[in-house]
Image (cartoon, grey):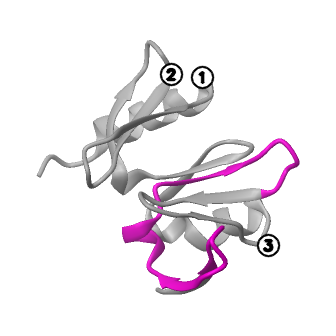
Amino acid sequence: MKIPLIGEDGVCRLIDPADSILYLQTDKTGRVRLYAPSHTYKPVQSVEEWASLLGAAGFVRVDRGTIVNMNKVHELDPDLRVLDIRTENGRSMAIPVTRAMMRRLQAEMVSRPKL
């Protein structure tokens, strides 16, 4: 699935969210921002709409304003309640997670078959 998004630079790009998007988060004004390794996008859809659209592609809503691409998660840290996301260039990003969501993610990770 490819979707058109306009970056903060004003350029429209056709992207595959599962490959390109690390996470989505609302800013102070409640507007959604999509974060990719090299671009930030400002879509017009709400967090709820994005959660519905991207759920089948491996994205999980970890709090009311943040959706994470679980395919990009390197590690769960239950003590700090963060997800560690690694970008293609090796940069690490810590995404805070609610306590209830951390328990759910830990349970899902344990129940996943080992590859």
Which sits in the foreground, 74 or 110? Answer: 74
Q: Earlier in the sequence, mark 1 or mark 3?
A: 3
Q: Nearer the viewer, residue 25 or 8?
A: 8
Q: CA distance from mark 3 to mark 2?
A: 29 Å
Where does label 3 land, which residue?
Answer: 44
Q: Amino acid at mark 2?
A: Arg
Q: Secondary structure at mark 2?
A: loop
Local secondary structure at mark 3: loop
- Tag 1, which secondary structure? helix
User: Image check: 19 left or right of 3?
Assistant: left
Residue at image mark 1:
99
Tell me the residue at 50%/58% (across/down): 59
Q: Is residue 85 left or right of residue 74?
A: right
Image side of residue 73 versus residue 80, left or right: left
80 part of magenta stretch: no
Mark 2 and mark 1: Cα distance apart in space: 7 Å
Q: Position of residue 7 (x, y in %)?
A: 62, 72
Q: Position of residue 10 (x, y in %)?
A: 67, 78
Question: Disc 3 residue type?
Answer: Val
The answer to which quarter of the image holds residue 78 is: top left
- The mark that comes first in sequence, 2 or 1, is 2
* Disc 2 to disc 1: CB gap under 8 Å: yes
Tag 2 residue: 81
Disc 1 residue type (three-letter)? Arg
Q: Please tell me which residue is depicted at 46% across the width and 86% down the height of the picture.
A: 1
Q: Which residues are magenta?
A: 5-31
Q: Residue furthest top?
A: 79
Give me the disc on residue 1.
Answer: none
Is 96 located above or below residue 112 in the figure? above
